[in-house]
Amino acid sequence: MKKVMFTGGGSAGHVTVNMALMPLFLNEGWSVEYVGSAQGIERELVGSLDEVNYFPISTGKLRRYLDIQNMKDPFKIAKGVYQAYRLIRKQKPQVLFSKGGFVSVPVVIGAWLNKVPVIIHESDITPGLANRISIPMASAVCTTFPETAEQISKDKTHYVGAVIRQELKQGNRDRGRNYCGFHKNKPVLLIMGGSLGARKINEAVRAALPALTENFQIVHLCGKGQLDPSIGVPGYKQYEYINEELPDVLAMSDMVISRAGSNSIFEFLSLQKPMLLIPLTKQQSRGDQILNARSFEKAGYCRVLEEDGLNDASLVSGVMEVYNKRDEFIGRMRNNKHSDALSAVFRLIKETAKHP
Ligand SMILES: CC(=O)N[C@H]1[C@@H](OP(=O)(O)OP(=O)(O)OC[C@H]2O[C@@H](n3ccc(=O)[nH]c3=O)[C@H](O)[C@@H]2O)O[C@H](CO)[C@@H](O)[C@@H]1O
């Protein structure tokens, strides 16, 4: 039987592309396996696909800052490499697809040591640390942005565009309204602070609720542990994270406030949702979201609000500006030609798979 192995995790941005690809392999009769951490979001998300065998390994985070954990993590990572090596030797997948995130590095090393071909996907303009370590061991690197090719050896890069889960396009407005208890008479504003939520955005949104709820019904995806049950404002609904309801919630939303994680913003683009983007700052990251957001701003798909200038007043005026010009944003998004990245990556993985 043909067998493909997936890895990637830490945040949903490193899992949702895999979630789009795995059903295609299952439909064609492949055996599908996933290697991730024991407790990360990848385990939860992959758990919804019964046919996929999940193998947890030991993981450590690759940090750019000083932390006591930095002493322990090299041992956890080394253990992960050993576990992944043994697992891959035993399971014998024909190919490994890695979506990055810190959990993926030991798995890529394990595949490389076993001479299993590796394909990587990079969603951001600049590759993340995990992918930078993994790229020399990969036979191909798929990218969402064309600019990424400049930083990777040319013969490895395949510019494919953004991989979008097919089910996101099958949402239904009425089901979304039903789920949130919303009516038809006020537009809906969706707030998504990335898959983990964004504390700063949550605070600004909550401070701006009196002004925002005058004009909008609000659905706020605020991240694990960040619900505020003390808020009882009518027309404001908060969830930590939603999964199967997301297509319907997107379908009913008239505009979004979001971080600028690559997967999220390409999903909004494909569904033509006008965006106010608040990218993660350079202090908190390598600055990839700033580049993502600026490239969308240049194309006329969004307005960007820097976190430094974020407060309830700037948030409300940013939202009103985007909403009032929504037809212009939608018009430009409509002219964007999507590539069928999902099929391109699916084909590439199959072509790269070692023949048993
Ligand atoms: C803090 C951090 O490291 N962020 C990075 C992470 O973001 P993050 O994990 O937030 O990734 P993205 O914004 O790219 O993707 C989030 C994914 O989660 C889904 N979703 C989100 C909320 C929800 O309630 N339900 C749901 O299904 C979205 O539809 C999307 O598919 O990976 C991205 C892709 O490499 C990077 O650009 C980000 O900089």
Image (cartoon, helix red, strand yellow):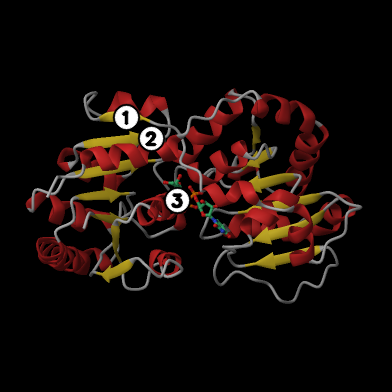
- Seen at 42% across and 55% down, the residue is 23
Relative image position of residue 219 (x, y in whole percent): 72, 59
- Seen at 15% across and 53% down, the residue is 111
Q: Residue 158 carries which label?
A: 1
Disc 2 is placed on an element classified as: helix
Relative image position of residue 331 (x, y in whole percent): 72, 25
Which residue, given by chain and number where applicable, does mark 3 sit on?
20
User: Contact, CB < 8 Å: mark 3 with mark 2?
Assistant: no
* Relative horizontal placement of residue 316, taking residue 29 as reference (left or right): right
Placement of 268 over or under 82, stated as above or below: above
Q: Residues within 10 Å of mark 3 (few under 14, many from 20)?
A: some
Amino acid type for the residue under numbered disc 2: Ala
Q: How crowded is mark 2: few (under 14 residues within 10 Å), some or many (20 or more)?
A: some
Relative image position of residue 14 (x, y in whole percent): 40, 52
Q: Distance between the residues labelled 2 and 1?
A: 9 Å
Q: How far apart are marks 3 and 2 (CA)?
A: 12 Å
- Seen at 79% across and 51% down, the residue is 188
Disc 1 is placed on an element classified as: strand
Which residue, given by chain and number where applicable, does mark 2 sit on?
344
* Relative horizontal placement of residue 26, taking residue 270 as reference (left or right): left
